Each structure stands twice: as structure tokens, then as C-alpha cells.
Image (spheres, rainbow, N blue to C red):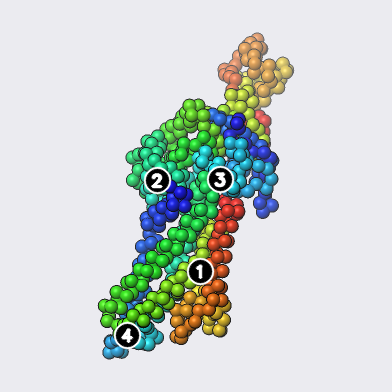
Amino acid sequence: MTPILAALQVETLKLRKSKLLWAVLAAFTIAPLMGGFFMFVLKNPEFAKTTGLLGAKAQIAGEATWKAYFSMLAQIIAVGGMLIFGFVASWIFGREYTDRTIKDLLALPYHRGILVIAKFLTVLAATTLLSAYVVAFGIFIGWGIGLAGWSAAVWQKGLFVLSITTLLTISLSTPLAFFASWSRGYLAPLGFMVLMVVFSQIIAAIGYGNYFPWSIPALYSGIAGEEYALKVGNALIVLSTSLAGVVATLVWWLYADQY
Amino acid sequence: MDNLIQTEGLTKRYNGFQAVRDLSLCVKKGEIYGFIGLNGSGKTTTIRMLLGMVKPTAGTCFISGEKVNLKNYAIWEKVGYMVETPYAYPELTVKENLHAFRRLRLIADPKVVDEVMDRLKLTPYADKKAKNLSLGNAQRLGIAKALLHKPEILILDEPVNGLDPAGIVEIREFLQELACNEGVAIFISSHLLTEIAKIATKVGIIHEGRLVQEVDAIKLHHLLNQRLVLDMREKKAGLEALASAGFAPFLNKAGFIEIYCKEAIHHPDDVARFLVYQGLAPTKLAVEEEDLESYFLRVIGQKGDRLL
């Protein structure tokens, strides 16, 4: 067995046995249910009138079509995913410090970087699977509601936007791994994550969202109500932030004193 | 190669605090090195430097003659370790924790887990989650993780913490067997000199980051202070008589007469005879040896020379 495979097996076991997986799965299950509910309300205006505030909010999606529904799912992943994926990354790295198991990982007979890479790959796999689950569950609900505007082109476009939004959002979870390692726990990364969500709203509102990595996935998902053309520059901003997160985490694990 | 563990001028300073200074020591195959110090004396920092977790400000550590650094990770194949209180993944059972570390240690044979559980009497707790283990069993699990890959070098930080008296004896005998029969070099830290003195072949005392004494365990008792303790009915007269004979006696807090004069300690019969001739027959006369904890405190300068 190679070190990376061994480390991946152990990371998978830890994740599988943890309560975190089920907690985030439950949290992410609520999102498409809510999206589906909004669509249901839109499809049934009479019901909307009797639901008061919720009915008014459901108007945000505009119309009960597959196009609008895909956009809503993308927004759920862009905003909800930022929190959920961030939490997954914070846990996978931070738990070694809070459970004080980190020291058992620091003197193994292979390069310490392998463990960091295995952890990032686990974050990638777990968050991709979570996104796939949300999309699959969302589509199932969409079918159940009987949304209008079904076509291969809508599907193709919808799934493409969802995939890119997911990748952009997952990419932004790497700095949280660094904050979890640097602060030796969950609190700092969770604080950072909330701060970035707030900043992404403010910066997008004042018109500079194009340049702020944490605003870009949400803008691309269509949260501003208009189609957003993702430029290479925007993608590079997100990817370089992600890379900075990976490098910072590696440097921390390799060179910082581990007390 | 002679020394399996070696440090040369090991020093660590952080945030203006001198945790370890100029520490040099070595441990050979089959040796048990007892590393004694108070809490915060630099034991754990030394162990972390030995394991490459903390970078020394100055000096070097060697494992099997190879310098400890990030690139030299192959050396950890020979090393089993346990740093501070052992922690395991709480949601995994004892068996799962050990299998996880078996994989991380790249051991293909799953039987090693059952073997190490048997050896450390963990088999009845195999399916118990680590978070539900008693401190003693968590300690055993920590030692089991350190032994999974049958290391040539064992570095253990306070390994008997939390164990009951039977467990302490068991682990002590187990470590002795590892060192004597399998030639494992063991570096073991503790704040209990009495406990360490029972298994160590060499003892190093660290205080405020400095190695203040290093001695072969068999020579340790030569360094312990001795005293002659006496009791008699006429203490005042006895003190005067002994003083006039040049024994420099004094009355201790417990109300006994103490003498540290070597002549008296080596010939208590002469003292007894002298007192009887003076008409001050002793009701108690005993040569007592300083205990190891007192010796330890004396060495690190926390108590006076006369403390027993």
C-alpha cells in the first residue's frame, strides 16, 4: 500500500465514522427541499397567497421552471456550500488539533505533505459527493413538482453552471484548512468563513464582487438576477486563493512548530 | 552504530522563554533512559524536538545516527512514540484506531493489531469506542499505537500516567522485557524519579531546560544522602553530649536527633556505645537513606541539602 492510499483510507474511515458527515448531509438536504418548496409555491399561487411572508420570498425565483430551479440550486451551493464545504474542510484539518491526534501524524515514515494532500483530496471528494447529492436530490424534487420548461439545452446549461459553481465554491474551502491548522481548532476558520460570507455580500453590493474570490461563485450562480459571464481573470482569482490555501496549509504542517 | 538516540547541544527558545538549553544526551540499544523533570521543565519540548515536531533553536537530534529533519522521514520507521497524554480518534473503537495506525504505518498484516491488543491486555476493549475508555486503557492504547510496527526505538512521555498500581507494574515489566530481550532503546520521561529508577538503566534530570544530572541508575543510591536518627529520654543532655563528641547533632521537626556526620553514619555502634557510657541509652537508633523524590528535589535545588 502506498502512503497516499493509506492516508486516504484512514481519512475516509474517520469521516465515515464521524457525526459531521450526517450533520452536513442533513443540513444540505434542507436546501433543495426549500428550493423545491419555493417552486411549488410559485406553481401554486393560491397556496402562495395563504403562506404570507414565505409566499413573498418565493417570488425571488420568478418562475417555476427548470431554468429558475437550476439557478436556485446553484445559488444554494454557492452560498450554502461556502458554509458547508468550509465546515467540512475546517473539521478535517481542525479535528486533529481539537482531538489532539495531530502528534500521531507528524512522525510517520513518509513525507508529512502526503497527509496534507490526502486531507485535501478527502475534502474534495466529500464536498463533491455532497454537491452531487444536493443536485440529484434537487432534480428528484423538481421532477416531483413537475416543473415546466424541460429541455436538453436547459439541463445541459443548468448542470454546467452547477458544476462550475460547485468547483469554485469547493476551491475556496482550502484557506479554511489553513486557519484550522494555524488556530489549532474550528473557531478561527468558522469565524473567517462567516466574515467572508458577509464581505462577499458587501463587496458584491458595491460593485467589486468580480475581484473578491468569495463573491465570484455566488455571482456566477446568478444570485444577482442576471447571467454572469465568468472570465478567465475571475476564475484565476478563485484558483489562486485556493492555491494559496493549499500552500499555506502545507507550509504550516511542514515548517511550523507543532506543540 | 552505538547511540540510537542522541542530542547535541539541543536548545529551544520561543517567545523569549528558554524551554531547553544546551541539552546533550544519548541512549544506546537495550538501554532505558529515564528523563526526569518537573512539569514545564522541558521534557515534552525535548521529546517533540527528538520527533521532529519542533525545530530546535540550536543543536541537533540524531535517530540511529541520522539527523532528525523533515527530509529524513525514513527514520520514523524505527521509532514508536507517545507524546503527552495519549489521544485517539474518539468515534473509532480501539480496534479501528489501531487498524488506522497500522495502515498509516504501512503494515500490511492485520494480525499485528490483535497481537498488540493481546500484549497490552486491550482485547476485552477492542470494540469499545476510544472516547469511552478509562484513562488507564487510553494510556494502553497510546502505547499499543507506539508498538504496532515493532520499533527499535521507543520514546514515551509519561507512559504510566493514569495507570493503576497493577498496570504500572505490568507496563514496567513490559518495557524492561522490550529493552532486555528485544534490545529496544527506550527514552521515557516522567516526573516520578522513584518510578523511573525501578526500570531505567540511566537517569537524566532536567530542570529549567538544563540537564542538571545524568547518572547510571545502579550508581544512583550512592548519591543519596544518609543520616543517623536517634531518640532518647534525655534529649537535651544527649544533644550536648553528642555535640561535645563532635557529631554535630540537631533536633528535627519530628523531635528526633539527627546526625549527618559520616563517621556516625558508618559506625552507629560507636555512637550507641558512647551514649550508653554517658548514661544516655538511645531508645531508637537508625541509619536512614534519603528517598529518591527528596534527592530529585535536592538536585534541582528546590529543597535544602538536609531534606530527606
The residue under label 1 is which amino acid type?
A: Leu
Mark 3 sits on what residue? Answer: B73
Residue A152, given in percent of the width and then of the height, sits at 33, 80
| Label 1 SS | loop
Local crowd at mark 2 within 10 Å, few (<14), some, or many (≥20)? many
Closer to the N terminus: mark 1 or mark 4? 4
Residue where numbered disc 1 is placed:
A172
Determine whether B249 is above or below B106 in the image.
above
How far across and down, in percent of the image, does residue A224 sit?
A: 47, 84
- Residue type, mark 4 in image: Gly
What residue type is disc 3 on?
Tyr
Residue B241 versus residue A157: which sits nearer the camera?
A157
Mark 4–mark 3 CB contact (< 8 Å)? no
Label 2, secondary structure: give it.
helix
Q: Residue at x 54, y 29 (%)?
A: B30
Q: Chain of mark 2?
A: B
Q: CA distance from mark 2 to mark 4?
A: 52 Å
The chain that hosts pointer 4 is A
Q: Between residues A252 and B233, which one lies in front from this camera angle? A: A252
As drawn, the residue found furthest toward the front would be A152
Q: Look at mark 2 in the image and give the residue it sits on.
A: B99
Residue A88 is situated, as x and y percent measured from the top left of the image, at 44, 63
Three-letter amino acid code of the residue under disc 2: His
Q: Is residue B59 left or right of residue B48?
A: right
Q: Are callouts 1 and 4 both on one chain? A: yes
Distance from label 1 to label 4 (Cα)?
33 Å
Task: Identify the image quadrant of residue B229.
Answer: top right
Mark 1 vs mark 4: give the one in front.
Answer: 4
